[in-house]
Amino acid sequence: MEAVGRNFTGVERAAVLMMLVGEEEAAAILQKLEPDEVRMLGKAMFAVADVAEPQVAHVLDDFVSKAKDRTAIGFDPRPQIETMMTRALGPDKADSVLARITPREEVCTLDLLDWLDASEIAALVEDEHPQIAAVLIANLDPAVAAEVLQLMPDAVQPDVLHRIAKLGPIQPDAIDMLRSVLSSRMGSATAPAAVPLGGTREAAAIMNNTRRATEQRVMPRLAKMDKETARAIEEEMFVFDHLLALDDKNMGTLLRSVEADILTLALKGVDETARNRFLGCMSQRAADGIRDEMEARGPMRLSEVLEAQRAILNIARQLAKDGTIMMGGKDDDYV
């Protein structure tokens, strides 16, 4: 049945349903969808956020009588949509999707980039100012952005990465200039208001998708340009959960370099599965001792837990730089 005063598409009907069900159920549904479907459905959820209750009733018939008590429709949909996306896709993928579906007053997307492959985008920005290259690359999915960055001349890669990390609000006239660069190939589009773009997290996501050789070449040179920014990017590149990817041998080597008191604090901030991954690489006696100490300490300050996790990350980074452990995770880590 069509809603009064408005004809809903099939995607919009699905979006209304998604806004009515619980966040966990919605996240479970999103996990089953393809990336294009996630973007399409997420965009539709923003489009139906202001739908009136009579329209909902017509779209969903008797379902609305059971679900309307927990709907967020009619209110700001961003927190609910962001939570769904993060639970379903993880923070990095969720940020990438949200950057492309959030309404224009919040975010800018250069949609024409979706029609170009990495080599075309690299060629497009080859003769442009590094700041233009940085803004264009920051609009891309991190995996595509990493490919574009690697196709650019070696000499400009650290500068472009630095500019991505330092990006802030982009003014409409700058967006117009970027769109003119793209429209020389594929046409033009309408520029939105100034929006936040880039940042160290975006730069880190790009570097996490590059080859190891690119990272080892770019990051030291970036550190010479701006040590603080390089350190901030490294911290975003390497989070505590990444340690779970270590194999047993490398995990054991790392744990032998960590004091029991620090490990006890750090493991207070992870779930039981992750905790078992760490303790499983220790002797039974040592693991039991850590568990007993964790239980005896009771609740701990989050700041203390995060500080302990950072300390372990610093040890892991140093061991990796020394060649004592292999962090893995990139396409050219193994021979």
Image: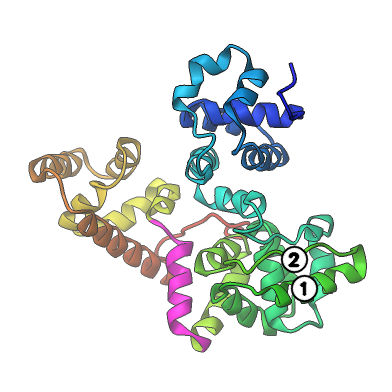
Most extreme residue toward the bottom is 224
Residue positioned 73% across, 67% down in the render: 148
Tell me where residue 100 appears, x and y as whole percent: 66, 53
Q: CA distance from mark 1 to mark 2?
A: 6 Å
Residue 271 visible, this angle: yes
Tell me where residue 224 appears, x and y as whole percent: 50, 88
Between 240 and 251, which is closer to the camera in this rendering? 240
The amino acid type of the residue labelled 1 equals: Asp
Which is more N-terminal, label 2 or label 1?
1
Q: Around disc 1, counting alpha carbons within 10 Å, would you say few (fewer than 14), some (14 to 19), or many (20 or more)? A: some
Where is the C terminus found, in terms of image quarters?
bottom right
In magenta, the rendered stretch is 225-239
Question: Is residue 32 highlighted in magenta?
Answer: no
Q: Around disc 2, counting alpha carbons within 10 Å, would you say few (fewer than 14), some (14 to 19), or many (20 or more)? A: some
Write down the quadrant of residue 184 in the picture: bottom right
Most extreme residue toward the top is 62
Q: Is residue 199 left or right of residue 171?
A: left
Q: How does the figure colour the protein chain or chains?
A: rainbow
Residue positioned 51% across, 64% down in the render: 201
Most extreme residue toward the left is 296
Tell me where residue 292 appears, x and y as whole percent: 11, 40
Give the residue pinned by disc 2.
191
Whether label 1 touches label 2, CB < 8 Å: yes
Mark number, residue 176:
1
Write down the quadrant of residue 282 in the picture: top left
Tell me where residue 114 appears, x and y as whole percent: 79, 55
